[in-house]
Amino acid sequence: MSDVIAIENLVKKHKSLKQEIAKIIVGQDQVINHILLSIYTGGHSLLVGVPGLAKTLMVNTIAQTLGLDFKRIQFTPDLMPSDILGSEVLDQNRNFKFIKGPIFSNIILADEINRTPPKTQAALLEAMQERAVTISGVQHKLELPYFVLATQNPIEQEGTYPLPEAQLDRFMFAIELKYPTIEEEIQVVKNTTSDTKVSINTLFNANEIIEVQKLIRRIPVPDNVVEYAVRLVNKTRPNLDTADNFVKQYIDWGAGPRASQNLILASKAHAAINGKFSPDIEDVQAVSLGILRHRIIKNYKAEAENISEEQIIKQLW
């Protein structure tokens, strides 16, 4: 099958997927799009939102429609690395046997990841980057496709451990969940306070998702689009001689090279789901907020003047 036909099929499947998810999840269209883009490209996502915005339900619903195994890990202050990775135990014959932890699944929902200490947060790093975990010197491969969708509560600071920049950088997207509109909330209340049972269909399987990921990587990108993406990331770095005064005024640290890679991958996927066979600058801009938001560190002046990451990124377009 040619890539042109494969992209046309992806457009249809993506539309059907959104319709299935909409049976359960009301609104949040942009959020769902970004989660699906990260899945189509093999990236991880960080969902930032206050409690009660159906983050868990959303991830569970997406996992069902994609035909993937799904496990939820509730991160708590006393969670140990072995609680998520697994551990070796002595069996009846006094031989060590590895018992897999919940991390061995296709989609992991790391719920409230900032409530667990750095040692346990770091246990996710190898899994996210290498798609493998090492226990007692033995590396165990994780089944593909593999995604970590982590949630973070922005308003609860007491007893939390903010994710270090190195780990934040492992997430392709940082996706902000906002409150629903009045109309959406009315629909949510109607749906969740009746005895109506909704069944959703599975539209993908693991192998098909892996094929989509390969297809996205084969999509050609014009040189001017690559240059635009790299220059956009470069503009976020205040310590360069060429840095704009606006950037020097409001940013302490800018994004690294992984941001440029993710911008191109995500813009390829964004172009594909919109029926285009190659991304343009508009595709880069469409994914740039989610990719750069968590990679820009604002300074005290930006905080004092209430300048958001989104305002800074849009200023750099």
Image (cartoon, rainbow, N blue to C red):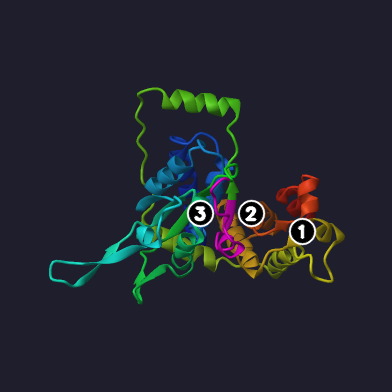
Please determine whether, in this image, residue 175 is positioned above or below residue 253: above
Give the CA separation, mark 1 to mark 2.
20 Å
Is disc 2 in contact with disc 3, using a CB cutoff of under 8 Å? no
Residue 50 within the segment the image draws in magenta: no
* Residue 2 appears in the rendering: no
Residue in front for this viewpoint, 71 or 281: 71
Task: Looking at the image, tell me whether mark 1 or mark 2 is earlier in sequence order.
Answer: 1
Mark 1 closeness class: few <14, some 14–19, many ≥20 residues within 10 Å = many
Q: Which residues are magenta?
A: 158-174
Q: Secondary structure at mark 3?
A: helix
On residue 287, which mark appears? Answer: 2
Query: Which part of the image, by quadrant, shows the C terminus?
Result: bottom right
Residue bearing mark 3 = 8
Task: Looking at the image, tell me whether mark 2 or mark 3 is earlier in sequence order.
Answer: 3
Percent x, y of residue 120: 45, 60
The amino acid sitting under disc 3 is: Glu
Percent x, y of residue 101: 33, 59
Percent x, y of residue 76: 44, 50
Residue bearing mark 1 = 251
